[in-house]
Amino acid sequence: MTIEPINATAAREFAFTDADFAQIAHVAKTEFGLNLADSKKPLVYSRLAKRLRLRKLSTFQEYLALLSKANEEAEKTELLSALTTNVTHFFREMHHFEALGKDVIPDLMARAKKGERIRIWSAGCSSGQEPYSIALSILGAFPDVARYDFKILATDIDPNILARARDASYPKSELEAIPNTAHRFLDLNESDAKNFTISESARNLVSFGVLNLISDWPIKGPFDVIFCRNVTIYFDAETQRRLWDRFQNALSPSGYLFIGHSERVTGSATSAFRSIGVTAYQKTSPR
Ligand SMILES: C[S@@+](CC[C@H](N)C(=O)[O-])C[C@H]1O[C@@H](n2cnc3c(N)ncnc32)[C@H](O)[C@@H]1O
């Protein structure tokens, strides 16, 4: 028996030419810094075909025309959501939270107690598990942190995912990733079999905002710690290099940078950091 090669194009609901793909890739790069390799073409097709269906369009050219309209900013966000993943979980890469608890938080708390302003930035925070894990770590060590000027800024490009982060409600299946010692800062809602919420004391430490990492940053640094994990994997090498430089500039002297397990600091910023663990860095050069 011979197996016929599958003609993927013939099976497609919408025509998707190399030129269509190149134009989508151009929008993704200029708007969001995303790097769409040619190998992503089938994935891009399947993710965006849903958008075409939903917007009742019949060609990718119509979709591109839509994206260029000034009043279609929300569709650009949908495009970004379709091309990236929001996967995250509580205490992801636990070694970062161990380093935070052991090496970083005690020092930050001592400075906060002297009246210093302390800021932590979770850049690309998705649905909030990362900044809330940071908040739970801080509260565990310093339950009276609210008395000091100690805040976490959590940003993401996607307003839809930020709405979920602000909601602070998560399925109980996610509880097992949270150390038992932190459960006292959760509202376990015994009457709700499905969801728990982050307690007010942890929520109050975090403020959320929309921010595109490859655009201007309308935020007030410097930051003592930056978490930017599993975000730069989508960017091309040049965008990544620029970002490491900008993070370095946004950090206070001796500030800390935590990045994702498959990410590496590259370019001129490498000489400004010393490694303090796996994908964990401390700034060594003055700003
Ligand atoms: C895989 S999640 C990572 C979440 C969390 N940092 C973690 O490690 O679990 C990647 C997040 O980056 C966000 N993102 C992608 N491109 C971005 C950009 N240009 N600016 C800001 N956020 C971006 C996505 O919306 C998504 O929520």
Image (cartoon, rainbow, N blue to C red):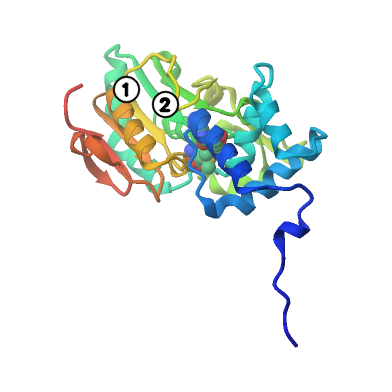
Q: Position of residue 271 (x, y in %)?
A: 18, 37
- The residue to which callout 1 is attached is 250
The part of the image, by quadrant, that contains residue 12 is bottom right
Q: Nearer the viewer, residue 144 or 232?
A: 232
Q: Residue 121 got which mark?
A: 2
Tell me the residue at 33%/42% (across/down).
99
Residue 129 shows in the view: no
Q: Callout 2: 10 Å neighbours few (<14), some, many (20+)?
A: many
Q: Residue 48 got which mark?
A: none
Q: Is residue 60 above or below residue 77?
A: below
86 left or right of 145 in image: right
Q: Nearer the viewer, residue 70 or 133?
A: 70
The quadrant of the rendering that contains the N terminus is bottom right
Residue 30 shows in the view: yes
Q: Position of residue 195 (x, y in %)?
A: 71, 38
Q: Is mark 2 within 8 Å of ligand 1?
A: no
Tell me the residue at 43%/48% (across/down).
93
Tell me the residue at 16%/28% (across/down).
285
Q: Give the amino acid at mark 1.
A: Ala
Q: Is residue 263 above or below residue 223?
A: below
Q: Nearer the viewer, residue 246 or 31?
A: 31
Mark toward the start of the polypeptide (1 vs 2): 2
Q: Report helix, strand or loop for mark 1.
A: helix
Q: Position of residue 269 (x, y in %)?
A: 24, 34
Q: Is mark 1 within 8 Å of ligand 1?
A: no
Q: Is label 1 in contact with label 2 (beta carbons under 8 Å)?
A: yes
Q: Callout 1: 10 Å neighbours few (<14), some, many (20+)?
A: many
